[in-house]
Image (spheres, helix red, strand yellow):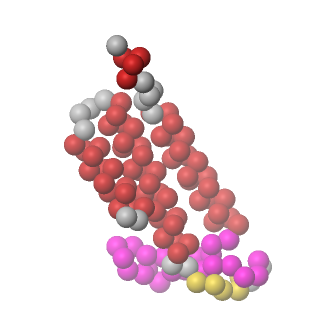
Amino acid sequence: MMTSGIAGAVRATAKAANDGPIKEYLTEVYRALYVAAEIRSDVLHARPATHPDEGQRLNRSETRNSRTTGTRFWIDDEWFDSAISALNEKLSAVSRVRPPFVHAAEEK
């Protein structure tokens, strides 16, 4: 299963869960996975090209609803910094709502 498929499965589980900390956690997890899936897709579908200032880089056609928009963008240092920042924000959101893990013996 690819990243977006995993995100979809987690999303379905989150929607079926009762309100509470587990649902909040699963919701943030699937949101983070969708961001990761988008980043992954951009890198995988980009093509090598010569950047005017940075030498060999990747160039990607922007898509919406599985169709190209006619806009292209560079996967360069600025793009990587932005992608890392977006992932870090999502991971922080997951960490904020992660419920404590309790060992079964501790519950008694």
Above or below, 4 against 76 in this view is above
Q: Is residue 74 magenta?
A: yes
Q: Residue at x 25, y 38 (%)?
A: 17
* Residue 3, quarter of the rendered image: bottom left
Residue 100 at what x, y percent from top left? 45, 27
Above or below, 90 against 58 in this view is above
Q: Quadrant of the N terminus?
A: bottom left
Q: Is 39 left or right of 56, judged from the image as shown?
A: left
Residue 82 at what x, y percent from top left? 62, 59
Q: Is 11 left or right of 61, judged from the image as shown?
A: left
Which residues, given as a range, are shown in magenta? 54-76
Q: Is residue 71 visible?
A: no
Q: Is residue 75 magenta?
A: yes
The answer to which of 106 and 53 lies nearer the viewer is 106
Residue 81 at what x, y percent from top left? 66, 59
The answer to which of 106 and 92 lies nearer the viewer is 106
Q: Residue at x 51, y 67 (%)?
A: 40
Q: Quadrant of the C terminus?
A: top left
Task: In the displayed orientation, state which residue is furthest to the top.
Answer: 108
Above or below, 39 against 13 in this view is below
The answer to which of 105 and 101 lies nearer the viewer is 105
Q: Residue at x 42, y 24 (%)?
A: 103
* Residue 65, quarter of the rendered image: bottom left
Give the number of callouts.
0
